[in-house]
Amino acid sequence: MKFLAAENGAGSVLVVALVATLMATTLLIAPLMAAHIDSAKAATAADAAALAAADTAVGIVPGAPCTNAARTAQANGASLTGCRVDGLVATVAVSRASGPFAATATATAGPPGTAP
């Protein structure tokens, strides 16, 4: 029975190693998940800004298409980095900064049947 005494505390070391591994994995995955969420929010802001610009180009909303797109992007937590209106079709690019990363997205909107 003396050989079992040498293994006292081995379970504690394994538990500490397992907890440390789980914490390290969580700390590595959290920024990636935040970047993924910011990417989705940037895509949403780009979609909304493109729709605002297209609505303005069609005449549903008064004003300048790119001005309304910038205002809509800012309301969604992003900044407008590009805006092009070709007839009734609007294409916008937005950027959303979060920490050291910046998520970018582009979107195009216009009336049905007016492909760019």
Image: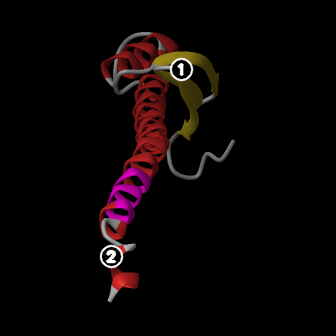
The image position of residue 115, as x and y in percent, is 65, 47
In the figure, 11 relative to 62: above or below? below
Image quadrant occupied by the C terminus: top right
| Residue 115 as seen in the image, left or right of residue 63 | right
The image position of residue 17, as x and y in percent, is 41, 57
Task: State the CA–CA distance, disc 2 to disc 1.
Answer: 51 Å
Magenta-highlighted residues: 13-21
**Between tags 2 and 1, which lies in front?**
2
The image position of residue 113, as x and y in percent, is 58, 52
Disc 1 designates what residue?
100
Q: Residues within 10 Å of mark 1 (few under 14, many from 20)?
A: few
Depth order, front residue of 69/12: 12
Q: Which mark is residue 5?
A: 2
The image position of residue 22, as x and y in percent, is 39, 55
Three-letter amino acid code of the residue under disc 2: Ala
Three-letter amino acid code of the residue under disc 1: Pro
Depth order, front residue of 54/21: 21
- The answer to whether residue 94 is seen in the rendering is no
Looking at marks 2 and 1 on the same chain, the residue that comes earlier in the sequence is marked by 2
Image quadrant occupied by the N terminus: bottom left
